Image (cartoon, rainbow, N blue to C red):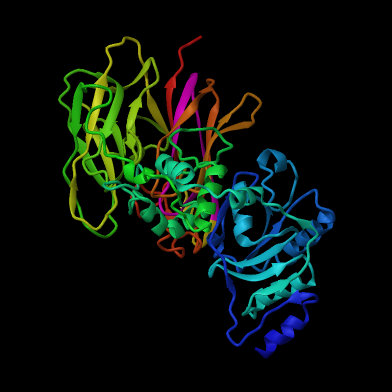
Amino acid sequence: MKEMHLFCTFIIGSICSVSTNAALDRVGDFALLDSQGEFHQLSRYQHRRAAVLMSYDAACTGMEQLLNDFQALAQTYRTDDIEFLLIDSLDLGRPAVRDYGLALPLLEDAGQLVSETLGIEHAGDVLVLNPERLTLYYRGPVSSALEQALSGVVKESIVDTLQASGGDCPIAYPGRAAHLETPPDYGTDVAPIIIEHCAECHRQGGVGPFALDSHIMLLGWSPMIREVVLNKRMPPTQVDPYIGHSDSARYLSKQHLQTLVHWIDQGGQRGNSETDPLEALNLTEPNGWQLGEPDFIVTGPENAISPTGVMDYIYDEVDLPFTEAKWVKAIQYRAGDASVLHHLMTFVTAPEEDFWGQERRQESVSRRFVEGYAPGKSNIREYPEGTGVLIPAGHKLSMQFHYVTNGQRTTDQTQLALYFSDEVGLQEQLVQAVPARFVLPPNQNNHALQAEHVFESDTVITGVRARMNYRGKKMKFAVEQADGSLKEILSVPAYNYGWQPHYILQQPELVRAGRKVHVIGAFDNSVSNPTNPDPNKEVTFGLNSWDEMFTGYFSFYRADPE
């Protein structure tokens, strides 16, 4: 404690509290994209001693000097495992800040919720954060106080949060101010957000681990809800909103985030509505076939689901009785037990093939992909007009099931409805697997990889899917243009092994003959990856879950000749 008192004397103008029960202030985990679309999460910097975050406003007087001094510190500590970042606390948005030409990543605080939660009051405010413990080493300006704090981080001598005064450019929080003046109403503002974005999974019988079916349930889970929306665990399958668009993704606007978080922060009041919209909601798995009576119903296996534990993938093959080729124009999945079926992938395979087909032997192959099942959707797929999935005579379906346990022993037997087309001259809907082979070194938090494929004829890309295992970090999909530049069509900046949906593009992408498509991404084989089984292990390519994969799938059909 004597050393702590001596340390405080170096901080001019500081407010440094020292007590016999010294402790670092707690902070919540958070995640943001930066102005280049890269994902940053505080708890995923555990391979660093600290993350240093400065609020940036180019219009603030003196910001240029503050930035220069901050960047100089970044250079000084570049070998000390300290990460330096900027944050757009004003929520100017990517179009406004993308061309700033900054040397450090600038995090996009859409809705200002992270800056608000961290208590950032002025442009130029700096926070030195402990990613492992989610605690705060230092709060204050770029000054000698900050330098002393960073030195203390390296020496592991800081035992109490250090604070220094400063800052001339106050940050306004108009969203918070508006909600303080007129608090969000549960019945008209909050419940509709839950109904639109959450209730389909978080309902009785849904795959979500708890039901959000009343105000009292929402209030009870509100601390967790606040946590998972700020660190972007939920909604799942989040993609970069600035790159392409897919209704298969789960976008949540910053206005909805502000409404939800501010309502929670203000106590989650019930309000005066006579009825509870969540109690009145009646969501059940649809029993009927929404496209009418199917031409053929595929009944999957009876899979027994244990009440607890983590289940590995289950693979199964379903023989088909067709003596002639069939063209499928649409499908619908119907889960046997939607509370445990997390996702399902289905391919058309030859008699001698398994689920992986020619991917076992070839690096880049075209395959017949039917569609995937994902929770919280209608799970209907109608292929683009003039196209279909071909099932040759004698072929079968190969399925990959992923289940989650929910505390109850149950059985799932999922059905797949097939709707056939008699139309002549259909283009075949296929999927192109574009993989990379690799050796993944241990303790690497950003091991970059890329793969590419040339389409020999004019091709229309209709969807994409990222496939990695536990160490997957990010993956984006791009199409090469005539001038050699890359047009990004979808980006998954925070890959999650538990969510591997097929993203149907709202706007299909035409690829001219001879052009390449690119898969660009990285692995995180470090302690910072919460799903990593062993960061000290070297991992190679393989199709088993304990191996690793780096495969981008492009759903496509060949365009009609002009």
**Image coords of residue 206 (percent x, y):** 30, 46
* Residue lying at 60% horizontally and 88% vertically, measured from the top left: 20
* Residue lying at 75% horizontally and 44% vertically, measured from the top left: 100
Q: Quadrant of the N terminus?
A: bottom right
Quarter of the figure with residue 139: bottom right
Does the rendering let one see residue 429? yes
Asked if residue 22 is positioned above or below residue 84 in the image, the reply reads below
Residue at the far bottom: name it: 2
Horizontally, residue 199 falls left or right of residue 133, namely left
Horizontally, residue 553 falls left or right of residue 183, namely left
Asked whether residue 92 is drawn in magenta, I would say no
Question: Observer-nearest residue: 321 or 235?
Answer: 235
* Residue lying at 47% horizontally and 26% vertically, measured from the top left: 461
Which span is picked out in magenta?
446-473
Question: Observer-nearest residue: 280 or 335?
Answer: 280
Quarter of the figure with residue 483: top right
Question: Observer-nearest residue: 191 or 438?
Answer: 191
Prevalent SS, magenta region: strand
**Image coords of residue 361 (percent x, y):** 35, 39
Horizontally, residue 226 falls left or right of residue 382, namely right
* Residue lying at 46% horizontally and 48% vertically, measured from the top left: 186
Does the rendering let one see residue 221? no
Quarter of the figure with residue 79: bottom right
Horizontally, residue 293 falls left or right of residue 442, namely left
**Image coords of residue 140 (percent x, y):** 73, 67
